[in-house]
């Protein structure tokens, strides 16, 4: 759902449409995402429109970047070790 909201704001029905879940299940997921401050939901008549709050993902992105640097350095070290052992 979050990935689809990166392209455009969508109604709950549009979010549920391609997924193997009911509208009610999609609505429950939207409520969880809203409580996590990952989306904003506005109501226009009977339609609920959802918008991604991308800034809310910045702490997770920073945490993942830190581990990406760690694992990149570890894999580089492993690659060096393998290259040195092949030289023997």
Image (cartoon, rainbow, N blue to C red):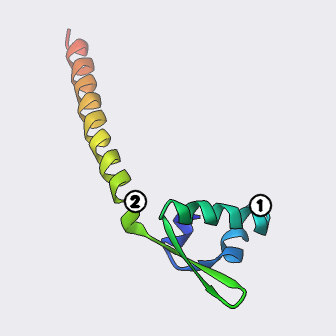
Labels 1 and 2: the sequence-earlier one: 1
Res 80 label: none
Q: Quadrant of residue 75?
A: top left
**Is residue 88 depicted above or below 82 in this figure?**
above
Q: Quadrant of the N terminus?
A: bottom right
How far across and down, in percent of the image, does residue 8 sit?
52, 79
CA distance for labels 1 and 2? 25 Å
Q: Residue at x 23, y 18 (%)?
A: 81
The x, y position of residue 14, in whole percent, is 68, 76
At x 77% / y 66%, what residue is drawn?
A: 24
Image x and y of residue 12, in percent: 67, 74
Quadrant (top left/top right/bottom left/bottom right) for the C terminus: top left
The foreground one among 31 and 64 is 31
Count the numbered circles shown. 2
Say few, some or many: other residues with alpha carbon within 10 Å of mark 2 (under 14 / 14 to 19 / 20 or more). few
Question: Residue 31 at x, y = what percent?
Answer: 62, 65
Kindly state the secondary structure of the residue where label 1 is placed: loop
Return the residue at label 2. 57
Mark linked to residue 21: 1
């Amino acid at each position: 759902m979050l990935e689809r909201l990166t392209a455009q704001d969508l109604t709950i029905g549009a979010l549920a449409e391609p997924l193997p879940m009911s509208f009610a299940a999609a609505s429950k997921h939207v409520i969880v995402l809203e409580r996590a401050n990952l989306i904003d939901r506005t109501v226009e008549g009977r339609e609920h429109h959802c918008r991604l709050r991308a800034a809310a993902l910045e702490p997770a992105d920073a945490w993942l970047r830190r581990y990406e640097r760690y694992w990149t350095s570890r894999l580089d070290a492993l690659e060096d070790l393998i290259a040195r052992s092949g030289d023997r």
